Structures are given as C-alpha cells and as structure tokens.
Image (tube, rainbow, N blue to C red):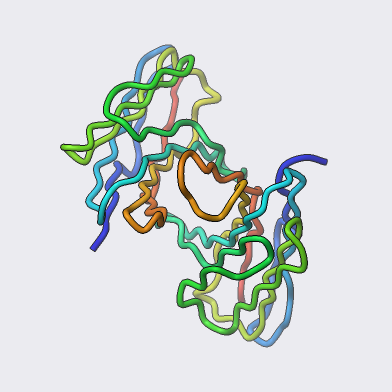
Amino acid sequence: GQNIDQPTEMTATEGAIVQINCTYQTSGFNGLFWYQQHAGEAPTFLSYNVLDGLEEKGRFSSFLSRSKGYSYLLLKELQMKDSASYLCAVRDSNYQLIWGAGTKLIIKP
Amino acid sequence: ETGVTQTPRHLVMGMTNKKSLKCEQHLGHNAMYWYKQSAKKPLELMFVYNFKEQTENNSVPSRFSPECPNSSHLFLHLHTLQPEDSALYLCASSPRGDMSGANVLTFGAGSRLTVL
C-alpha cells in the first residue's frame, strides 16, 4: 500500500528552528507538496518539490531526497503564528495525491 | 470575494435529514474537489470535477451526492448520513484536473459536519 509518515505533534520555541520530516512509500513519484493549516482554516500551499535538493522560500525551506523517499520542511525564526498543522502530500505515478495525517506544530514563547 | 468559499461553516444534522454543502471559487479554475478531513487522519479525496464533468468518485457511499452545475460551483448533497460521517468537508479547486506539474490546490475553510 501507499503510505506517508509524519510525526503527529512537535513542540518548538519562538525564535528557534524546527524540522518536520515526511517519509513516503508510494507507487512512483511525481512531486511532493507541503501545506499549512491553521486550526479552523483552509490548508494553504507552502512548497512543491519534484527534484532533489533544497527549495528556500523566506523563513521556510523544503528538502527532497527521492532515493530515500524523504522530505523535510524547515522553519526558521519561529513565530507564534507558525503554530499550525503541516501536511505532506506526494503525487504518485497515477498523479493521485497521497496525503499524510499532518504534523501539529506547537510554538511556545 | 476571492478564493474558495464554503457554506455553511458548521452544520448539525440528524441521520434522517437532507442537507447540502456549497462551494464557490472565484479563481477561474477548471477543476473542483471534495475532501473529507477527520481528526488525525489523512485527507480523503471524495470527488473530482474537471470542466464540470465528474472524473473521480473515490468509492464514496451513495448517501453523498455531488453536483457541479458550472466550473465555479460545487455542491455536496447529504442524506441519511451516519455518525461516522461527522468530519470537516473541504472543497478545493485547481487550474486543471490533470494534477501534472505544480497544479496547486486552493482550499476553502471547510464545512464542519456533525451527524447526531
């Protein structure tokens, strides 16, 4: 079967750095997405990786290793507003999106 | 208004009721989706419409009935639901339905459904 694994919950301190991991086993690979979802709000797109390496976008970076079936989302200079759930999704060989259950990130002052 | 709008935001219904969820997008997208989001579970794709035509029905029970009158509007008609159907129902749209390239989904805030 197809599977996406992410930690259920993480806690970090304001101003610090946190890395949220995502490992996947899917039938093929056609891209990996990260979305952010604040409680009671819509998931919003953060990043898209299709080639190996690091994509940087301001305080957020996303890394992909296709050979290892692994990605991470790196959040720097954490702010209280970064408290949210982070969803990892992989597009398989049939162009279906396979979703992880999400990682709830709690930021403490 | 911009983005994807869902109404109602909250809905409580009995198992014998009939209700509908509405989704509207103002992004000029051609594909629309219904997802089910349950606590601590991955998003479950329910239906996909591409240019008003249903292109995917992910083995969803017939008590959920989608309707897409045009590329901007999507409905989910609900009848004789079960308590286990209680969840957040998310609508999304994307420029196209083929999911190739960075065909990013734009989500609405969801309709929180409680079935008593």
* Nearest the eye: B74 or B44: B74
Spot the residue most to the left.
Answer: A68
Q: Whole-percent x and y of residue A29?
A: 29, 47
Q: Whole-percent x and y of residue B7?
A: 76, 58
Compared across the picture, whether A41 is left or right of A56 comes to right
What residue is at 37 percent from the left and 54 percent from the top?
A98
Q: Quadrant of the C terminus of chain B?
A: bottom right
Compared across the picture, whether A24 is left or right of A55 comes to left
Q: Quadrant of the N terminus of chain B?
A: top right
> For residue A34, what is the image quadrant?
top left
For residue A1, above or below residue A55: below
What residue is at 52 percent from the left and 62 percent from the top?
B36
* Nearest the eye: B30 or A97: B30
For residue A44, above or below residue A52: below
Compared across the picture, whether A2 is left or right of B4 comes to left
* Nearest the eye: B104 or B61: B104
> For residue A71, what is the image quadrant?
top left
For residue A51, above or below residue B116: above
